[in-house]
Image: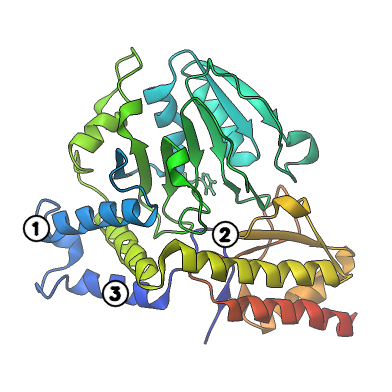
Amino acid sequence: MKIHNFSAGPSILSKEVIESAAKSVIDINNSSLSLLEISHRSKDFVDIMENAQNLAIELLGLENKGYKAIYLQGGASMQFLMCAYNLLETKAGYLNTGTWSTKAIKEAKLFGEVVEIESSKSKNFNYIPKNYFIPDDLDYFHITTNNTIFGTQIKDIPVTTIPLISDMSSDIFSRRINFSSFDLIYAGAQKNMGPAGTTLVVIKENILGKVKRNIPSMLDYKIHIDKGSMFNTPPVFSVYTCMLNLTWLKKNGGIEAIEKRNNDKAKLIYDEIDNNELFVGFANTEDRSAMNATFNLVNDNHSEIFNSLCSKANISGINGHRSVGGYRASMYNAMDIDSVKVLTEVMSELKNKV
Ligand SMILES: *Cc1c(COP(=O)(O)O)cnc(C)c1O
């Protein structure tokens, strides 16, 4: 039975990736050993790690530009503190566009002064602030490119003279961006890249080594880079599955091709939201996310019947986050447009039922 899984995260992966990942648990590279029981220092795994790092750099178009890719643990939430630990000497700027930015700001405050350059909090984060000024005396400026919970996405990446850091957990590898505008990008794997358990960090190496404080080894980017992401035992299953997924992405035309598919899916759902008088979108139109579409029923009394139509159509995971309510359809890279069609058909069918 085909379930249309709109979960915001952990999210879907392609069937092909799941099957290869499952096979590796039984037998990796025809070795008669499980991926889970081989040394992370074995050639089999060292090759997997290098491949996962190289694919990330290649797909982002960052080859030969001074960037390193590492796979760490602790989720994107660990990066909230780790980027500040490594890079915040006196003062940093943050754009507050939602729950995750707010959490990043809270952690950074442990390490220095944090300036909230702009915030969309007063409107429950339903838009992306624009036309703000970024002072050049900051150690860095931090943004969240896609706000998973509120369904907004930064379309125009700010231009800065200072290092630019982004949490791209929920839209990395989903659209073309000039990734070399960033000095540090991090993304928890479980939204658009793989299973939970690892976080991709892509760093321009020359921004490191500038803060005076001592950094514990496990939290020091330089150490993880120098050790090739093998300072301690890496989360082998998660890294392997990310590698499979990035291989799948490359084979399917890379970011350029997936962006087109993602835009087609987004257009389909937003057209339905705009043309169906029973629904209303949550996010400001021009800031709508192509990954997470947030919307509400105009009349809450219709929710019971809409929910039951959804479950009859095998649609799962579309309940909105508690801070927004309503519905959220997450349409990460691995989702087919056919699943989005099933959802828009159900939304349309609701008109005949109420
Ligand atoms: C899910 C999410 C996080 C939190 O990720 P963890 O890996 O669970 O720590 C951070 N930022 C964004 C944008 C997210 O979507």
Q: CA distance from mark 3 to mark 1?
A: 19 Å
* Mark 2 crowd level (few <14, some 14–19, many ≥20, 10 Å Cα): many
Question: What's the residue at 88%, 85% (across, down)?
Answer: 352
Closer to the camera in the image, 323 or 41: 41
Residue picked out by circle 1: 43
In the displayed structure image, the side of residue 21 where residue 94 appears, left or right: right
- The answer to whether marks 3 and 1 mark residues whose Cβ atoms lie closer than 8 Å is no
Circles 1 and 2 in contact, beta carbons < 8 Å: no
User: On the picture, is 108 further left or further right than 55?
Assistant: right
Circle 3 SS class: helix
How far is the residue under mark 1 from the one under mark 2? 35 Å
Q: Amino acid at mark 1?
A: Lys
Q: Nearer the viewer, residue 332 or 178?
A: 178
| Circle 3 Cα neighbour tier, 10 Å, few/some/many (<14 / 14–19 / ≥20) | some
Q: Amino acid at mark 3?
A: Ser
Q: Residue at x 59, y 68 (%)?
A: 6
Spatial CA distance of label 3 from label 2 is 23 Å
Specify which label sits upstream in the sequence, 3 or 2.
2
Image coordinates of residue 313 in percent, x first then y, are 66, 83
